[in-house]
């Protein structure tokens, strides 16, 4: 499995925000989001191939009990199945961060699903080979339904403009099985000022529509720096 980085920090997004966690970031993604904030794991994948034993040993060397398996897209790697089993045997709490477009029978305590809205599609003028591919693969209703049925979950949407909120509502109408109490709206941005500006209209929207607002705590605390 190709790994971009392994580090300990705090979970910055979702229902477990603020909890000390070890992050295992796989490298490689079949999507190409316009606002991807980890291009070194997607647009230009970095990292080395590591054995499962080496990954487990490195994770075990950190003090945090919570482990976040992220990417890139971690569900691209079939090795994720035995890796989650090994980490569970160590007593670790596992969150998997995924776009909800690939399924693997992993072990998981929280499936953090980030469906990709139309705002994620890259600009054709800048990346002519990727928009059509991204559009074809960014939405897999069959995978979303299976993940929601089989795992404890949260659904996290990246919101760039107010129009994206309307797309979220249309999305949720397609999935009546999704509990709105488990839906989070997160502003798109990688700096404190952008996040604060979008929070001014997104927080009231969340309150009005009974959805969770999702801050990006790690950006607010550390900025957009790698390994934090």
Image (spheres, rainbow, N blue to C red):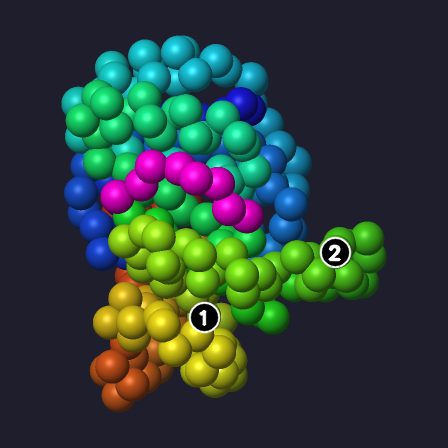
Q: Quadrant of residue 214?
A: bottom left
Classify 10 Å Cα crowding around label 1: few (below 14), some (14-19), many (20 and above): many
Q: Is residue 193 visible?
A: no
Residue marked by disc 1? 159
Q: Residue, x 48% and y 41% (percent of image)? A: 104
* Front position in the image: 205 or 225: 205
Q: Is residue 28 above or below residue 35?
A: above
In this image, 175 relative to 12: left or right?
right
Residue under the point 29% across and 25% down: 87
Horizontal and vertical percent for residue 128? 82, 57
Q: Which mark, by number, is residue 74?
A: none
Question: Is residue 40 located in the magenta-colored stretch of the structure?
Answer: no
Which of these two is toward me, 202 or 109? 109
Residue 103 in the magenta stretch? The answer is yes
- Local packing at callout 2 (Cα closer than 10 Å; few below 14, some 14-19, many 20+) is few
In-image side of 121 versus 202 (left or right): right
Disc on the earlier residue, 1 or 2 = 2
User: In the image, is 140 to the left or to the right of 70?
Assistant: right
**Vertical order, 224 against 165 (above or below):** above
Q: Residue at x 28, y 33 (%)?
A: 67
Q: Position of residue 162 (x, y in %)?
A: 46, 82
Secondary structure, mark 2, is helix
The residue most toward the bottom is: 208
Q: Quadrant of the C terminus?
A: top left
Kindly tell me whether residue 46 is visible in this rendering.
yes
Q: Is residue 59 above or below residue 29?
A: above
Q: Which mark is residue 133?
A: 2
Q: Which residues are magenta?
A: 102-109
Residue 181 lies, in percent from the top left, at 24, 72
């Amino acid at each position: 499995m190709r790994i971009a980085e392994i580090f300990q920090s705090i979970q910055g997004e979702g229902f477990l925000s603020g909890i000390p966690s070890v992050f295992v970031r796989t490298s490689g993604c079949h999507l190409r989001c316009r606002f991807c904030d980890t291009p070194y794991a997607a647009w230009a994948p970095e990292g080395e191939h590591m054995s499962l034993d080496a990954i487990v040993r490195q994770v075990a060397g950190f003090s945090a009990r919570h482990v976040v398996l992220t990417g890139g897209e971690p569900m691209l790697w079939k090795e994720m199945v035995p890796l989650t089993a090994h980490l569970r045997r160590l007593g670790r709490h596992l969150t998997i961060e995924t776009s909800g477009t690939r399924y693997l029978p992993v072990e998981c305590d929280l499936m953090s699903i980030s469906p990709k809205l139309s705002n994620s599609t890259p600009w054709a003028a800048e990346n002519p080979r990727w928009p059509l591919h991204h559009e074809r693969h960014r939405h897999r209703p069959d995978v979303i339904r299976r993940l929601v049925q089989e795992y404890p979950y949260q659904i996290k949407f990246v919101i760039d403009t107010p129009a994206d909120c309307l797309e979220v509502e249309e999305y949720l109408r397609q999935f009546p099985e999704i509990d709105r109490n488990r839906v989070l709206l997160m502003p798109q941005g990688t700096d404190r000022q952008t996040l604060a500006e979008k929070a001014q209209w997104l927080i009231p929207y969340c309150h009005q529509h009974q959805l969770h607002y999702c801050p990006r705590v790690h950006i607010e605390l550390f900025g957009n720096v790698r390994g934090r």
